[in-house]
Image: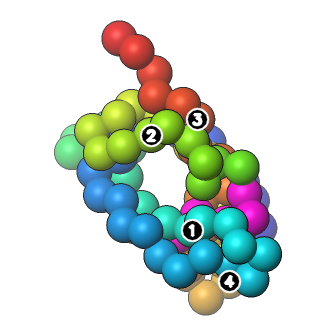
């Protein structure tokens, strides 16, 4: 699995059940505007027990994200940074 990095806009976020360790998880939708012509949209889940699940990011935030795509095509967000202020 190759980890990809991009600057993206969070467009959708929904809380899921906690992991077995009690840490939160989210379903997240992002748009990567640097991909032409309209940007690339991705929909996936945050990694279990990842520190990004405690971040202060919300819808319409611009963040740096790291993600990978599993063999079956699921998108897993490994890292979502704190929002970048313009």
Residue found at the very far left of the displayed protein:
38
Q: Taking 8 as reference, is 54 above or below it? A: below
Whichever of callouts 1 and 4 sits on the residue coming sooner in the sequence is: 1
Q: Which residue is mark 4?
A: 71
Q: Which residue is mark 3?
A: 81
Please report the bounds of the magenta region as a residue range: 45-50
Pointers 3 and 2 in contact (CB under 8 A)? yes
Say which element carries label 1. Answer: loop
Q: Which mark is residue 57?
A: 2
Residue at screen point 35% across, 59% down: 13
Pointers 1 and 3 in contact (CB under 8 A)? no
Q: Quadrant of residue 61?
A: top left
Whichever of callouts 4 and 3 sits on the residue coming sooner in the sequence is: 4
Q: Quadrant of residue 15?
A: bottom left
Q: Which residue is mark 1?
A: 25
Say which element carries label 3. Answer: loop
Say which element carries label 2. Answer: loop
Give the image location of residue 44, x and y in percent.
48, 69
- Label 2 crowd (10 A; few <14 / some 14-19 / many >=20): some
């Amino acid at each position: 699995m190759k980890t990809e990095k991009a600057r993206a806009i969070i467009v959708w976020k929904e809380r899921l059940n906690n992991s077995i360790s009690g840490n939160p998880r989210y379903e997240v939708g992002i748009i990567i505007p640097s991909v032409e012509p309209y940007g690339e949209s991705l929909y996936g889940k945050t990694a279990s027990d990842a520190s990004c699940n405690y971040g202060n990011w919300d819808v319409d935030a611009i963040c740096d994200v790291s993600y990978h795509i599993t063999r079956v095509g699921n998108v897993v967000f490994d890292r979502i940074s704190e929002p970048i202020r313009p």
